[in-house]
Amino acid sequence: MHVLLLVAALAAQQIDSTTPPRPPRTIAIDERLAADFRVAVGDRLILSDTWGGTGDTVIVSALVQRRADPSEIARAEYRVRMHLDELQALTRYGDRVDRFAIATRPGAATDSAIRAINSAAFGFQAYRSRDIAVETSRTFLVVSRFHRAIGVITIVASAVFLLCIMLLKVDERRRDVAALRLLGISARSIVRSVMIESALVAVLGSGVGVALGWISAWVVNWHYRDVYRTPLAFAVVTPSVVALAVSLSIVLGLAAGFVAAQRLVRVPALDLITGRRAA
């Protein structure tokens, strides 16, 4: 009996010795981690919960690019994607999770899933993905409102600046305006010509401003994408923004030209020539 058991044990050892070892598992790491520690696809790493400790050997199979998510800009930690059993063994969490995501069909399925999860047990709380995005993006909403306020102040300041330019430009041409009025040119024609000229100046200025805005957006994105290593666009010049800027520029230019022209046509032509102003 002992001889048979010994032979069986030797046979089992031979079978075990001929069985090939299990190949290492694979993981996907953050491309920032790969760049900082010079790790490439195919390298072997050791997963351990302590620095320099023993653990499982894995192979890097892919590099994960950071998403264009504003909520992840301020986070500087690295990310590693691995199999669930490896993560459980590494964190020693067992069959527990902090949070998980569920994809549902559009419509009432989302509401029923939220109610079912919230009523499953005490401590469970389900949220919509858009609600989480709103909560994590409140800081960026404040920044957006701040930029909007700066934009309004800039528009008002540019309108005042444009009005001052038109007033000075028209005031320098008061003798020409007086000569036109003495020749029989109506005040309406003079006002119209000044408004057209101011609109052309406004369109030219808005074109230069759009070009400067596009260059500034490119520089901002180039710099901060390199700093935060993210594909997120920090500054964008959209067609709606361009259309709004050009339309506001034309409206403000017409208004400035109208005010400047009315300031001259209300003064008698002889007073314009002599340099006097009506009371």
Image (spheres, rainbow, N blue to C red):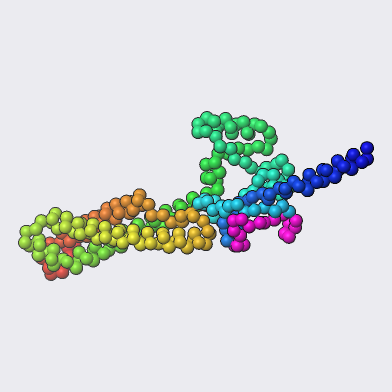
Q: Position of residue 33 (x, y in %)?
A: 60, 58
On screen, residue 153 versus residue 27, left or right, reads: left
Q: Position of residue 201 (x, y in %)?
A: 24, 60
| Residue depicted at x 67% and y 49% | 25
Instruction: Magenta stretch: give its range.
Output: 36-54
Q: Nearer the viewer, residue 27 or 278?
A: 27
Q: Position of residue 278 (x, y in %)?
A: 17, 63
| Residue depicted at x 69% and y 56% | 46
On screen, residue 94 versus residue 243, left or right, reads: right
**Residue farthest bottom in this picture:** 274
**Residue farthest left in this picture:** 183
| Residue depicted at x 17% and y 61% | 264
Q: From where the camera sits, is residue 149 visible?
A: no
On screen, residue 233 versus residue 208, left or right, reads: right
Q: Nearer the viewer, residue 214 or 141?
A: 214
Q: Position of residue 2 (x, y in %)?
A: 93, 40
Q: From where the camera sits, is residue 184 visible?
A: yes
- Quadrant assignment, res 48: bottom right
Q: Nearer the viewer, residue 81 or 25?
A: 25
